[in-house]
Amino acid sequence: MKFNEYVIGKSYRTNSIQLSKKDIIDFAKIYDPQYMHIDEAKAKEGRFGSLIASGMQTMSTSFKLWVELGIYGEEVVAGTGMNNIKFIKPVFPDDEISVLAEVIELAPRRSSGGIVTVLLTTFNQNNEKVFQAELSALIRN
């Protein structure tokens, strides 16, 4: 979409994706090799009683689901920021997550287009919030 087509308050719902135990471990081995993400036995003794997805994986997966909607399309120039990042609840193996993206701010630029900020709120299969962040991108007209 072009910058001038975005409307504050408009929401978009993504598809969902299930994160398997293997997905969680494989991601964490590369990007966040802490015990609660890669060591099942140790994780069972921890606070959550199970392996949990890395917050970075939840954030990346949320962004992936948003981008796959194709709303940005060819008009996106670049991301400009991510603010107010909140890891609200852990994502467990076999949880299915989806995202509600709401346009919360539009900031026109002098040239063409402007910055679009969306509030990404990620939910698990029980409709519980697990993640939230404001994501901004420069979009052309």
Image: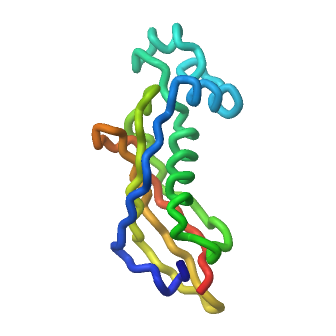
* Left or right of 63 on screen, residue 45: left
Judge whether 135 appears above or below 65 on screen.
Answer: below
Q: Identify the residue at image location x=58%, y=14%.
A: 39
71 lies above or below 98? below
Quadrant the C terminus occupies: bottom right
What residue is rendered at 56% in x and 39% in y? Answer: 57
Which x, y percent locates residue 65? Answer: 51, 53
Q: Residue 30 location, x and y as percent?
A: 71, 30
| Residue at image coords 33%, 38% | 125
Above or below: residue 117 compared with residue 45: below
Identity of the residue drawn at 36% across and 67% down: 11
- Taking the image as shown, residue 114 lies to the left or right of residue 46, namely right
On screen, 124 above or below 63? above
Residue 107 in percent (x, y) is at 51, 81
Report the label total. Answer: 0
Name of the residue lying farthest toward the right? 30
Residue 81 percent coordinates (x, y): 59, 62
Quarter residue 87 falls in: top left
Q: Which colour scheme is used?
A: rainbow
